[in-house]
Image (cartoon, helix red, strand yellow):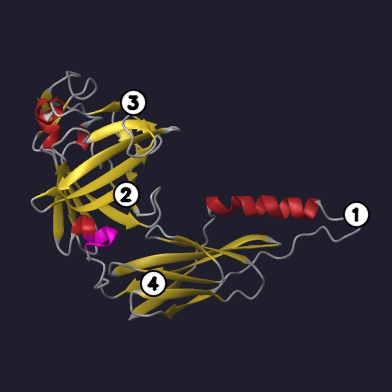
Protein backbone atom coordinates (compact mmCIF):
# COMPACT_ATOMS: atom_id res chain seq x y z
CA UNK A 1 0.00 0.00 0.00
CA UNK A 2 1.18 3.56 -0.62
CA UNK A 3 -0.06 6.94 0.54
CA UNK A 4 0.28 10.28 -1.22
CA UNK A 5 0.46 13.76 0.27
CA UNK A 6 0.45 16.96 -1.82
CA UNK A 7 3.03 19.60 -0.89
CA UNK A 8 2.68 23.23 -2.02
CA UNK A 9 6.05 23.94 -3.51
CA UNK A 10 7.58 24.19 -6.95
CA UNK A 11 10.98 23.27 -8.20
CA UNK A 12 12.88 24.54 -11.17
CA UNK A 13 14.80 21.68 -12.79
CA UNK A 14 18.11 22.51 -14.38
CA UNK A 15 17.65 19.67 -16.83
CA UNK A 16 14.65 21.37 -18.44
CA UNK A 17 16.04 24.88 -18.70
CA UNK A 18 16.57 24.11 -22.36
CA UNK A 19 12.80 23.90 -22.73
CA UNK A 20 12.51 27.58 -21.83
CA UNK A 21 15.07 28.36 -24.50
CA UNK A 22 13.08 26.29 -26.96
CA UNK A 23 9.90 28.18 -26.07
CA UNK A 24 11.67 31.50 -26.59
CA UNK A 25 13.04 30.38 -29.95
CA UNK A 26 9.59 29.13 -30.96
CA UNK A 27 8.10 32.53 -30.21
CA UNK A 28 10.94 34.31 -32.00
CA UNK A 29 10.35 32.24 -35.13
CA UNK A 30 6.66 33.17 -35.44
CA UNK A 31 5.71 35.15 -38.46
CA UNK A 32 5.10 38.88 -38.15
CA UNK A 33 1.56 39.62 -37.12
CA UNK A 34 1.04 36.43 -35.15
CA UNK A 35 0.28 36.53 -31.42
CA UNK A 36 3.69 36.66 -29.72
CA UNK A 37 2.46 36.61 -26.13
CA UNK A 38 3.17 33.64 -23.90
CA UNK A 39 0.28 31.75 -22.45
CA UNK A 40 -0.38 31.12 -18.78
CA UNK A 41 2.14 29.15 -16.77
CA UNK A 42 1.24 25.46 -16.77
CA UNK A 43 -0.19 24.01 -13.56
CA UNK A 44 0.95 20.38 -13.64
CA UNK A 45 -0.92 17.69 -11.77
CA UNK A 46 -0.58 13.92 -11.64
CA UNK A 47 -1.88 10.81 -10.00
CA UNK A 48 -0.14 7.66 -8.84
CA UNK A 49 -1.46 4.23 -9.80
CA UNK A 50 -0.23 1.00 -8.32
CA UNK A 51 1.45 -1.26 -10.85
CA UNK A 52 2.17 -4.97 -10.61
CA UNK A 53 2.84 -4.78 -6.86
CA UNK A 54 3.18 -2.31 -3.97
CA UNK A 55 6.70 -1.28 -5.01
CA UNK A 56 5.93 -0.69 -8.68
CA UNK A 57 3.98 2.48 -9.40
CA UNK A 58 2.81 4.35 -12.48
CA UNK A 59 3.01 8.15 -12.57
CA UNK A 60 0.26 9.60 -14.76
CA UNK A 61 0.16 13.19 -16.02
CA UNK A 62 -3.25 14.75 -15.27
CA UNK A 63 -2.43 18.37 -16.10
CA UNK A 64 -5.31 20.50 -17.36
CA UNK A 65 -3.30 21.95 -20.24
CA UNK A 66 -0.85 20.41 -22.74
CA UNK A 67 2.67 20.07 -21.34
CA UNK A 68 5.88 18.20 -21.98
CA UNK A 69 6.22 16.23 -18.70
CA UNK A 70 9.49 15.67 -16.84
CA UNK A 71 9.62 13.63 -13.63
CA UNK A 72 12.25 13.66 -10.90
CA UNK A 73 12.15 11.42 -7.83
CA UNK A 74 14.11 11.81 -4.61
CA UNK A 75 15.63 8.35 -5.11
CA UNK A 76 17.52 9.78 -8.08
CA UNK A 77 15.24 8.62 -10.89
CA UNK A 78 14.51 10.94 -13.82
CA UNK A 79 11.69 10.05 -16.21
CA UNK A 80 9.73 11.50 -19.10
CA UNK A 81 6.36 10.84 -20.70
CA UNK A 82 2.70 11.22 -19.79
CA UNK A 83 2.86 7.80 -18.12
CA UNK A 84 6.05 6.70 -16.36
CA UNK A 85 6.70 3.45 -14.50
CA UNK A 86 8.98 3.38 -11.47
CA UNK A 87 10.09 0.77 -8.97
CA UNK A 88 10.81 1.74 -5.36
CA UNK A 89 13.27 -0.72 -3.83
CA UNK A 90 13.18 0.36 -0.20
CA UNK A 91 10.38 1.34 2.12
CA UNK A 92 10.17 5.05 2.95
CA UNK A 93 8.82 8.39 1.81
CA UNK A 94 9.83 9.79 -1.57
CA UNK A 95 9.16 13.13 -3.23
CA UNK A 96 7.98 13.01 -6.84
CA UNK A 97 8.10 16.22 -8.86
CA UNK A 98 6.35 16.70 -12.17
CA UNK A 99 7.66 19.65 -14.15
CA UNK A 100 5.61 20.65 -17.16
CA UNK A 101 6.98 22.66 -20.05
CA UNK A 102 4.27 24.57 -21.87
CA UNK A 103 3.95 27.61 -24.09
CA UNK A 104 3.80 29.82 -21.01
CA UNK A 105 6.99 28.45 -19.49
CA UNK A 106 7.63 25.94 -16.72
CA UNK A 107 5.46 24.88 -13.82
CA UNK A 108 5.89 22.08 -11.32
CA UNK A 109 4.20 20.26 -8.50
CA UNK A 110 5.56 17.85 -5.89
CA UNK A 111 3.83 15.03 -4.06
CA UNK A 112 5.13 12.70 -1.38
CA UNK A 113 4.70 8.96 -1.86
CA UNK A 114 5.14 6.51 1.01
CA UNK A 115 6.22 2.97 0.24
CA UNK A 116 5.25 0.58 3.02
CA UNK A 117 7.67 -2.31 2.40
CA UNK A 118 11.01 -3.20 0.87
CA UNK A 119 10.82 -4.82 -2.53
CA UNK A 120 11.04 -8.54 -1.61
CA UNK A 121 13.00 -9.23 -4.81
CA UNK A 122 15.46 -6.34 -4.42
CA UNK A 123 18.10 -8.28 -2.49
CA UNK A 124 18.48 -10.86 -5.24
CA UNK A 125 22.20 -11.15 -6.08
CA UNK A 126 21.31 -10.60 -9.73
CA UNK A 127 20.25 -7.03 -8.94
CA UNK A 128 22.74 -4.25 -8.14
CA UNK A 129 21.39 -3.53 -4.64
CA UNK A 130 21.28 -7.22 -3.74
CA UNK A 131 24.77 -7.78 -5.08
CA UNK A 132 26.17 -4.81 -3.15
CA UNK A 133 24.31 -5.21 0.17
CA UNK A 134 22.79 -8.74 0.04
CA UNK A 135 19.59 -9.15 2.09
CA UNK A 136 21.19 -7.92 5.35
CA UNK A 137 24.60 -6.33 4.89
CA UNK A 138 27.76 -6.94 2.91
CA UNK A 139 31.38 -5.93 3.53
CA UNK A 140 33.88 -5.10 0.81
CA UNK A 141 37.63 -4.40 0.62
CA UNK A 142 39.94 -3.50 -2.23
CA UNK A 143 40.68 -6.66 -4.18
CA UNK A 144 44.13 -7.87 -2.98
CA UNK A 145 45.54 -8.22 -6.47
CA UNK A 146 47.29 -6.07 -9.06
CA UNK A 147 44.98 -3.54 -10.72
CA UNK A 148 42.78 -3.01 -7.67
CA UNK A 149 42.74 0.65 -8.59
CA UNK A 150 43.76 2.18 -11.88
CA UNK A 151 43.30 5.25 -14.01
CA UNK A 152 43.19 5.59 -17.76
CA UNK A 153 41.24 6.53 -20.85
CA UNK A 154 37.81 5.09 -20.19
CA UNK A 155 36.24 2.87 -17.56
CA UNK A 156 38.19 -0.23 -16.51
CA UNK A 157 41.31 1.02 -18.29
CA UNK A 158 44.64 1.44 -16.49
CA UNK A 159 46.79 2.73 -19.33
CA UNK A 160 47.82 5.82 -17.30
CA UNK A 161 48.57 4.05 -14.00
CA UNK A 162 47.59 0.85 -12.24
CA UNK A 163 48.41 -0.55 -8.82
CA UNK A 164 50.75 -3.53 -8.81
CA UNK A 165 50.84 -6.75 -6.81
CA UNK A 166 53.42 -5.19 -4.47
CA UNK A 167 50.96 -2.46 -3.50
CA UNK A 168 48.83 -5.01 -1.65
CA UNK A 169 51.50 -5.06 1.07
CA UNK A 170 53.14 -1.71 0.28
CA UNK A 171 49.81 0.05 0.75
CA UNK A 172 48.40 -2.37 3.30
CA UNK A 173 46.62 0.49 5.10
CA UNK A 174 44.43 0.93 2.01
CA UNK A 175 43.78 -2.76 1.45
CA UNK A 176 42.55 -3.19 5.05
CA UNK A 177 39.81 -0.55 4.62
CA UNK A 178 36.27 -1.92 4.94
CA UNK A 179 33.19 -0.66 3.08
CA UNK A 180 29.94 -2.03 4.54
CA UNK A 181 26.53 -1.58 2.90
CA UNK A 182 23.38 -2.40 4.84
CA UNK A 183 20.12 -3.43 3.19
CA UNK A 184 17.77 -1.14 5.10
CA UNK A 185 15.44 1.75 4.48
CA UNK A 186 18.09 4.23 5.61
CA UNK A 187 20.72 3.09 3.11
CA UNK A 188 23.42 2.76 5.76
CA UNK A 189 27.02 2.86 4.51
CA UNK A 190 29.96 2.54 6.91
CA UNK A 191 33.59 3.22 6.05
CA UNK A 192 36.24 1.84 8.43
CA UNK A 193 39.86 2.64 7.59
CA UNK A 194 41.12 0.75 10.65
CA UNK A 195 42.73 3.87 12.07
CA UNK A 196 45.29 4.43 9.33
CA UNK A 197 45.68 5.60 5.74
CA UNK A 198 48.21 5.67 2.93
CA UNK A 199 49.46 9.26 2.72
CA UNK A 200 50.25 9.07 -1.03
CA UNK A 201 52.04 12.42 -0.98
CA UNK A 202 48.98 14.48 -0.05
CA UNK A 203 47.36 13.08 3.12
CA UNK A 204 48.63 13.73 6.63
CA UNK A 205 52.35 14.54 6.52
CA UNK A 206 52.44 13.78 2.79
CA UNK A 207 54.72 10.75 3.04
CA UNK A 208 54.65 7.73 0.76
CA UNK A 209 53.67 5.33 3.51
CA UNK A 210 51.01 4.45 6.05
CA UNK A 211 50.15 7.01 8.74
CA UNK A 212 47.70 7.10 11.68
CA UNK A 213 44.43 9.02 11.46
CA UNK A 214 45.84 11.51 13.99
CA UNK A 215 48.03 12.91 11.18
CA UNK A 216 45.06 14.06 9.12
CA UNK A 217 44.60 17.83 9.21
CA UNK A 218 41.19 19.34 9.98
CA UNK A 219 40.19 19.63 6.33
CA UNK A 220 41.09 15.97 5.68
CA UNK A 221 39.54 14.46 8.81
CA UNK A 222 36.17 13.74 7.09
CA UNK A 223 38.09 11.18 5.00
CA UNK A 224 38.67 9.05 8.10
CA UNK A 225 36.24 6.35 9.24
CA UNK A 226 32.60 7.37 9.33
CA UNK A 227 28.93 6.50 8.96
CA UNK A 228 27.29 7.65 5.76
CA UNK A 229 24.42 6.65 3.45
CA UNK A 230 24.20 5.22 -0.04
CA UNK A 231 21.80 4.85 -2.95
CA UNK A 232 21.77 2.44 -5.88
CA UNK A 233 20.58 4.29 -8.98
CA UNK A 234 19.70 3.26 -12.53
CA UNK A 235 21.91 4.12 -15.49
CA UNK A 236 25.69 4.11 -15.56
CA UNK A 237 28.14 3.87 -18.44
CA UNK A 238 27.67 0.08 -18.60
CA UNK A 239 23.92 0.14 -17.94
CA UNK A 240 24.38 -1.79 -14.69
CA UNK A 241 23.45 1.11 -12.42
CA UNK A 242 25.30 3.52 -10.18
CA UNK A 243 26.35 3.52 -6.53
CA UNK A 244 26.07 6.91 -4.82
CA UNK A 245 27.69 7.41 -1.41
CA UNK A 246 26.40 10.41 0.51
CA UNK A 247 28.03 12.51 3.24
CA UNK A 248 31.08 14.77 3.52
CA UNK A 249 34.09 12.48 3.24
CA UNK A 250 32.21 9.43 1.93
CA UNK A 251 34.29 7.67 -0.70
CA UNK A 252 35.44 4.33 -2.07
CA UNK A 253 39.06 3.73 -3.04
CA UNK A 254 41.26 6.82 -3.17
CA UNK A 255 40.12 9.75 -1.05
CA UNK A 256 41.02 12.44 -3.58
CA UNK A 257 38.90 11.05 -6.44
CA UNK A 258 35.44 12.50 -7.07
CA UNK A 259 33.12 13.08 -10.00
CA UNK A 260 34.89 15.29 -12.50
CA UNK A 261 38.35 15.36 -10.97
CA UNK A 262 40.64 15.05 -7.97
CA UNK A 263 41.06 17.21 -4.85
CA UNK A 264 43.91 16.63 -2.38
CA UNK A 265 43.22 19.31 0.24
CA UNK A 266 40.07 17.73 1.68
CA UNK A 267 36.51 16.87 0.65
CA UNK A 268 34.24 19.74 -0.34
CA UNK A 269 31.50 17.63 -1.96
CA UNK A 270 28.65 15.87 -0.17
CA UNK A 271 28.36 12.82 -2.43
CA UNK A 272 30.19 10.79 -5.06
CA UNK A 273 28.45 8.69 -7.68
CA UNK A 274 30.28 5.62 -8.97
CA UNK A 275 29.28 3.81 -12.15
CA UNK A 276 28.97 0.06 -11.69
CA UNK A 277 31.41 -1.38 -14.23
CA UNK A 278 31.05 -5.05 -13.40
CA UNK A 279 29.52 -7.46 -10.86
CA UNK A 280 31.13 -10.90 -10.86
CA UNK A 281 29.70 -13.57 -8.52
CA UNK A 282 32.52 -15.62 -6.99
CA UNK A 283 34.92 -13.72 -9.24
CA UNK A 284 37.47 -13.67 -6.44
CA UNK A 285 37.08 -17.39 -5.72
CA UNK A 286 36.25 -19.04 -2.39
CA UNK A 287 32.91 -17.27 -2.25
CA UNK A 288 34.31 -13.77 -2.81
CA UNK A 289 32.35 -11.57 -5.23
CA UNK A 290 34.01 -8.90 -7.35
CA UNK A 291 32.58 -5.39 -7.77
CA UNK A 292 34.14 -2.84 -10.14
CA UNK A 293 33.27 0.84 -9.71
CA UNK A 294 34.32 3.73 -11.92
CA UNK A 295 34.43 7.52 -11.64
CA UNK A 296 34.70 9.78 -14.67
CA UNK A 297 37.26 12.59 -14.43
CA UNK A 298 37.81 15.24 -17.06
CA UNK A 299 37.42 13.45 -20.40
CA UNK A 300 38.73 10.92 -21.21
CA UNK A 301 39.98 10.02 -17.73
CA UNK A 302 38.42 7.38 -15.47
CA UNK A 303 39.41 5.88 -12.13
CA UNK A 304 38.32 2.27 -11.61
CA UNK A 305 38.28 0.53 -8.21
CA UNK A 306 37.93 -3.23 -7.85
CA UNK A 307 36.46 -4.51 -4.58
CA UNK A 308 36.19 -8.03 -3.19
CA UNK A 309 33.46 -9.15 -0.79
CA UNK A 310 34.50 -10.46 2.62
- Circle 3 residues within 10 Å: few <14, some 14–19, many ≥20: few
Instruction: Tell me: 182 left or right of 298.
Output: left
Task: Calculate the distance from the C-alpha at mark 3 to the C-alpha at mark 1.
Answer: 58 Å
Q: Is residue 255 visible?
A: no
Q: x%, y% of residue 231?
A: 30, 55
From the viewer's perspective, is the residue at label 3 or at label 1 nearer? 3
- Circle 4 residues within 10 Å: few <14, some 14–19, many ≥20: some
SS of the residue under disc 1: loop
Q: Is residue 191 above or below residue 128?
A: above
Q: Residue at x 13, y 39 (%)?
A: 177
Magenta part of the protein: which range?
Answer: 125-130
Q: Residue at x 37, y 60 (%)?
A: 75
Task: Name which of mark 2 and mark 1 comes first in the sequence.
Answer: 1
Task: Calculate the distance from the C-alpha at mark 2 to the C-alpha at mark 1.
Answer: 53 Å
Pointer 4: what residue? 113
Task: Calculate the distance from the C-alpha at mark 2 to the C-alpha at mark 4.
Answer: 28 Å
Pointer 2: what residue? 276
Q: x%, y% of residue 205?
A: 17, 19
Q: Is residue 114 above or below residue 259?
A: below
Q: Quadrant of residue 192?
A: top left
Q: Is residue 70 above or below residue 293?
A: below
SS of the residue under disc 4: strand
SS of the residue under disc 2: strand
Tag 2 near tag 4, CB within 8 Å: no
Amino acid sequence: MFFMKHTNKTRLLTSVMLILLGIALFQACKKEGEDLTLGALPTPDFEVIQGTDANNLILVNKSSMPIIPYWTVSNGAKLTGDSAKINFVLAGSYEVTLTGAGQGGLGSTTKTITIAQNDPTACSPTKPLGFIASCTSKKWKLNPEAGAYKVGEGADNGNWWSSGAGDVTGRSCEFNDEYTFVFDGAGTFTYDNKGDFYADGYLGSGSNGCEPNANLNNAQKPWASGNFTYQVLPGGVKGLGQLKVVGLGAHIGLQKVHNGGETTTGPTWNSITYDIIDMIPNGGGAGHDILKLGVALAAPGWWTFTLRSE
